[in-house]
Every structure is written in structure tokens, then in C-alpha cells.
């Protein structure tokens, strides 16, 4: 959250990992240590605490909210029809897809949890530095959000 500009502020964790792997392939060398890809994410949490998310599911869900303005209900309907964007909802490192990991009920819980967390963290995006935009629609000045909790309008 520090700095004058956030170069990777418009990238999900999966995008950052993909970019890092690209750098290694491009240079034909391990510029970014392979160990970095195996570390469990921990957003500055206490020792032995880790992010409680499956980023192969949560990152594309948040991307759908921000970039396509997809509603939580529509995401659940897409899941139930097995019609989620396969380019966005990719298999994890073990080859498991979102459909392998979730039922309609558990996916709904993940979607609504992500939606609530995204809405409650508006202040973080307002306090952060400007980002370099690479997505179709990024968090930023075109995504005005209320900072009032529980606002549904």
C-alpha cells in the first residue's frame, strides 16, 4: 500500500504468479525463485496465519465483480450451468477446477463472502496509490463505491 504508483495494483495473485513465471521463461532462468510460487499467501498476518482463500476461485470471482459488474446471483447461476469463463476460472496446480471444488451451496458462500469483503475494503483502495490499469475495468475512479457499510443501494 506504499508508494507513488502501484505497478501490480490491477493484478490478482494469480496474475502476479503468471507474470513471474513468464519472467522466468522469458529469461530462461529462475529470476524469481520457484519457492515463491509454493509459499502460502499471508497478507501480513501473524506468524503461522495464512490467507483463508483459494485464489483459483476467489480471484476470478472478484475479477467478475470489478471488470464485468457481474452480480453474485449471476455468478452462482453461471456456476450452476457450468458456464463460468474458462479463461478466467482456470484449474489449480493440482488440476482441480472450481466445479471439482464446489457445490452450488459452497460456491454461493464463497461468492457472497468475496462480495462482502470487497465492499468492506473500499477504504483500502481509496488509500492506496494510483494503479497501472491493465484489465478491462479496474478498481479506481471508474468504480465508485460507497464507504458506508451495509449500504445496498
Image: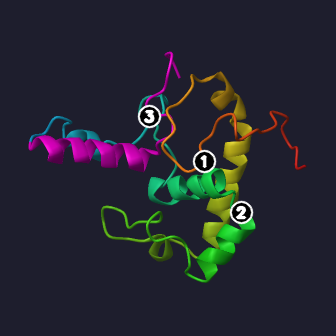
Asked whether the residues under the numbered discs 3 and 2 touch, taking CB atoms below 8 Å apart as contact, a structural biologist would say no
Point out the frontmost of discs 1 and 2.
Answer: 1
The crowding category of the residue bearing disc 1, from other C-alpha atoms within 10 Å (few below 14, some 14 to 19, many at least 20), is: some
Judging by the rendered image, the residue that carries numbered circle 2 is 72
Where on the picture, by quarter, is residue 148?
top right
The alpha-carbon separation of the residues under discs 3 and 1 comes to 14 Å
Q: Which residue shows up at 71% across the image and 70% down it?
A: 74
SS label for mark 1? loop
- Per the rendered image, the range of residues in magenta is 1-28
The crowding category of the residue bearing disc 3, from other C-alpha atoms within 10 Å (few below 14, some 14 to 19, many at least 20), is: some
Judging by the rendered image, the residue that carries numbered circle 3 is 8
Q: In this rendering, is residue 38 above or below 146?
A: below
Among the two numbered marks 3 and 1 on one chain, the one whose residue lies closer to the N terminus: 3
**Residue 108, x across and y down, in percent:** 67, 67
In the visual, does 115 lie left or right of 94?
Answer: right
The dot on residue 137 is 1
Q: Which residue shows up at 24% across the image and 47% down it?
A: 22
Amino acid at each position: 500500500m506504499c508508494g507513488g504508483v502501484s505497478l501490480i495494483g490491477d493484478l490478482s495473485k494469480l496474475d502476479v504468479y503468471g507474470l513471474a513465471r513468464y519472467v522466468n521463461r522469458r529469461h530462461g532462468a529462475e529470476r524469481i525463485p520457484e519457492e515463491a510460487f509454493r509459499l502460502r499467501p499471508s497478507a501480513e498476518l501473524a506468524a503461522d496465519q495464512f490467507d483463508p482463500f483459494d485464489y483459483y476461485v476467489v480471484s476470478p470471482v472478484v475479477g467478475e465483480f470489478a471488470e464485468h459488474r457481474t452480480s453474485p446471483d449471476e455468478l452462482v447461476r453461471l456456476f450452476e450451468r457450468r458456464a463460468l469463463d474458462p479463461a478466467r476460472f482456470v484449474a489449480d496446480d493440482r488440476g482441480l477446477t472450481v466445479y471439482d471444488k464446489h457445490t452450488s451451496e459452497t460456491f454461493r458462500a464463497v461468492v457472497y463472502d468475496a462480495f462482502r469483503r470487497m465492499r468492506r475494503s473500499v477504504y483500502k483502495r481509496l488509500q492506496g496509490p494510483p494503479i497501472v490499469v491493465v484489465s478491462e475495468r479496474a478498481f479506481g475512479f471508474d468504480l465508485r463505491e460507497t464507504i458506508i457499510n451495509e449500504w445496498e443501494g
